Image (cartoon, rainbow, N blue to C red):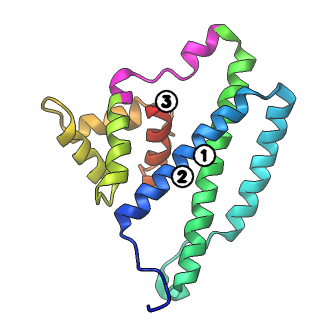
Amino acid sequence: MGEHAPPRSLQQLRAEWRERLQTARDRAAAQVDDMGLADLRALRATIGEEMERVEERLPDPGPVETKGPMTAEQQAEHVQAALQYHALQVRKQLVAHELRRRALGPAAVEQEIEVPPTTRHYATLAWDVMGETDAETTADVYREVARRAEGDVHLTTVEMWLREKNPHHPEETDGRWTELRRAVLLASA
């Protein structure tokens, strides 16, 4: 390990990941504000094409036993590709929201993405938890948010507000970390 940089902790990597996704969201929000309808549609298509290219670089899911372990370089490439893919997903979502907002007109803006205040509060706490603690699973995140929330809050209540009552959380998912992170990022904005 002599010439390589020292390994960083999972917490540091999550904090960096969190920061980069937040930057991607902020940049995308600023970008879509200045674009016309045709440009937004073109951007949506471009993002879709880029996501397909990045998706090809992601490793196929499957047990390590059948594929063998990844080298450090392969892991680094995978992490970079995954980060790029998630940043593109955030951009795509923001473009889709902006296109929907413009299509529905000003009257629909309030109802388009109305995040309940409790969801927004828990999402802000969850975003901090995901970047600061050693939470490994979504259940760990819910537990830590429940601990940090004022009052006596159960982790199932936190999960309800962050998943079921969060308009940004896809309903059909099994509660994976990536969906929660993306939903929390958008709800806490």
At label 2, the amino acid type is Arg
- Which secondary structure lies at badge 3? loop
Mark number for residue 24?
1
Residue at 53% in and 77% down: 75
| Along the viewing direction, whichever of 78 and 62 lies nearer the viewer | 78
Residue bearing mark 2 = 20
Residue at 34% in and 45% down: 128
What's drawn in magenta, residue-wise?
Answer: 107-120
In the displayed structure, does residue 172 sit left or right of residue 31?
Answer: left
* Residue at mark 3 to residue at mark 2: CA–CA distance: 23 Å
Main secondary structure type of the part rendered in magenta = helix
Mark number for residue 64?
none
The answer to whether mark 2 and mark 1 are in CB contact below 8 A is yes
Residue bearing mark 3 = 167
x and y percentages locating residue 61 in the rendered image: 55, 71
Residue at 50% in and 90% down: 3
- Which secondary structure lies at badge 2? helix
x and y percentages locating residue 134 in the rendered image: 29, 60
